[in-house]
Every structure is written in C-alpha cells, then in structure tokens.
Amino acid sequence: MTILLAPMEGLLDFPLRDILTRVGGIDRCVSEFIRITDQLLPDRVFTRIVPELLNGGRTHAGVPVRAQLLGSDPSCMAENAARLATLGPAGIDLNFGCPAKVVNRHGGGAALLVDPELLHAIVSAVRRAVPADMPVSAKMRLGYLDDSMAVECAQALASGGAEELVVHARTRADAYRPPAYWDRVNDIRLAVSIPVVANGEIWNVDDARRCQQASGCQDLMLGRGMVVNPGLALSIATPGHAGLPWASLLPLMAEFWKLIQTRVEPRHRAGRIKQWLNFLRRHYPEAEEAYGQVRTTNDHALVGQTLFA
C-alpha cells in the first residue's frame, strides 16, 4: 500500500507537509498547485511554492514530493513542465480536480472535466515535454456538475500518458460534502490500465478499509484526515498502531510554528496555527483547550507565548 499526502491550497503547504511527513506513514506528497496561465514561470516561483525542490525534491524527512501544475493551455503547460523538470521534482502532477470558483471560472481544475479531448491534449503535451524517466500523474474529481463523464475523462488522462491517477470521489458540485462515492472510483479503476489512488472522506482506519473495499484501490490519498489526525497514515499502514498522542504532537507543533515564522507574514502567522488547531480539535480534546486560549487574538507574539513558551 502507498499512502499519499494530498495537495490542499492554503492548508497543506510546505510547512505542514514538512511536519506531517516527520510523523511517518506518508510515502509521497503532492504540492499545492502552481498556476500556469500564458507565460513561462521563473525558477523562483516553482521553488517558492515547492521549497522541497531545493532539497532534492523531498521533504526534510526524506519523503518525495511531486510538484503540481494547474492550467488549461497544453503548450504553456508543457513549456512550464519542461522547466520544472530541470529543478528535480519527484514527479509532475496535473490538477483536474480543484473546485475553487476563481480557478474554474478561468477554465482550470475541475472545470476541465467537461472536455476529455483537452484533458488528453494537456497530459500528452506535458508527457512529451519532460524526460521519459520523470513520472507524470494526474488528479481528478468524478466530474464537474455530475459524474456522467468520469470514466471517459479518466481514460483520456490515461491514454494521454498519465502514469497514475488519483480520484477524489466527489464531483465539483459535491464540493467537500459527504459522502464520497468510492464505488465510482472502482468503475474508473476497472476502465483504465494505470494505477488508481482513491481519495476523499478518509478520517480514520475504518474509513480507509471501507474505501479500499469499495474502490478496489489499495493505494490511498489522505487530505483533511491527516490534518485532523497526524498519526492517521501510520495507523492505516501499521495495523494495531495506536496513533500519535498529544504529548508527541506538541514538539511537532512547535516546529511548525518555527517554520511559520520564517515563511509567513507576521499578520498571517496567528491564523495559520489557529487554522491547524481548529482541525486538530476534531481528534484531540487538548486541542480544543489550546484553540480556546488563542481563538480571539491575532497577535502572533502573544499566540506564540501562549502556546509554546
């Protein structure tokens, strides 16, 4: 079984990838998306969003990171993928699942799931543009407004040259509302000849097992479930593993706070730790208390003193 850490814009970025991969259980990460429009991006844009490129394409714990591109122009995507490949990512992933309105309005992310021919053209162009030994993968939802084209879109991505496909088991219209339709991932898995990874609504070990059974996929991608419970991947990968106790998480949270100090503007720092605590309180009673202590302040110095002094 391979367990991937999902890309989540504004949440699962470099600092949290760094910390969560220190816990263990994650085999590979995908970065948050790099938006491609009509120009060739300079190296500094790629390394700003994916700092792991400066560390051999891996987190500090040694977990490989695939850099994700989002765009709708095959030529421009290919040109940027070629430049990105020279920076040494663990692979290049293509985003066909982002549900954000601003992205979809400009024809990116999940909005492309109404045009299988364009999906094929984008993947084909990227595959031709990067070295043969550079993995190219894709992430999709079940569709845009409905899942009627799910299999056709997946086949277009596979025939275009994607070597692996992650399927978030909801449409764009479903957003993040439960349930996830894992059985539809099985339909896709049976229709393509490349590995398929199931994603969506995996919050605990039981969810993971039910997802594997319904989707037929051994490999999983974890997103919000890992943010809520950083020991989730270990518990899934290691039967009987008790998870990560709060006392063991505290020093990792302190390291996260240090990373935030170096990468986030002061006015946003308090928000970042509060954002994570807000997720953590779904699993840890201690996080509820910690969140309550800092919920009403945006003074990052005071937040740091309260939580980590």
Image (cartoon, rainbow, N blue to C red):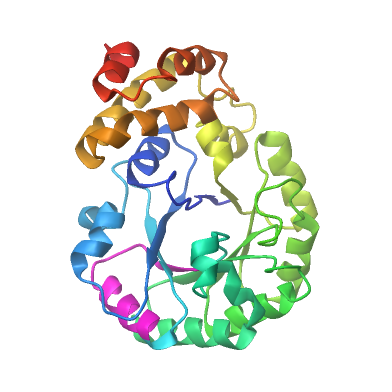
- Coordinates of residue 72 in the picture (x, y in percent): 47, 79
Which residue corresponds to the image point at 44% horizontal and 20% vertical from the top-left? 295
Which residue is more in the foreground, 47 or 127? 47
Check residue 87 for magenta coloring.
Answer: yes
Position of 163 relative to 202 (above/below)? below
Which residue is more in the foreground, 236 or 8? 8
Q: Is residue 109 left or right of residue 33?
A: right
Which residue is more in the foreground, 171 or 67? 171
- Coordinates of residue 30 in the picture (x, y in percent): 44, 56
Q: Quadrant of residue 147?
A: bottom right
Position of 305 relative to 281 (above/below)? above
Which residue corresponds to the image point at 73% horizontal and 35% vertical from the top-left? 206
Which residue corresponds to the image point at 38% horizontal and 34% vertical from the top-left? 272
Position of 229 relative to 89 (above/below)? above
Check residue 49 for magenta coloring.
Answer: no
Q: Report the label total.
A: 0
Q: Quadrant of residue 39?
A: bottom left
Which residue corresponds to the image point at 63% horizontal and 83% vertical from the top-left? 115
- Coordinates of residue 118 in the picture (x, y in percent): 56, 86
- Coordinates of residue 265 in the picture (x, y in percent): 24, 39
Q: Give the residues drawn in magenta, as a range.
A: 76-95
Position of 82 relative to 46 (above/below)? below
Query: Dividing the image into 4 quarters, which one contains the C terminus?
Result: top left
**Residue 124 shows in the view:** yes
**Residue 233 shows in the view:** no
Q: Is residue 128 left or right of residue 50?
A: right
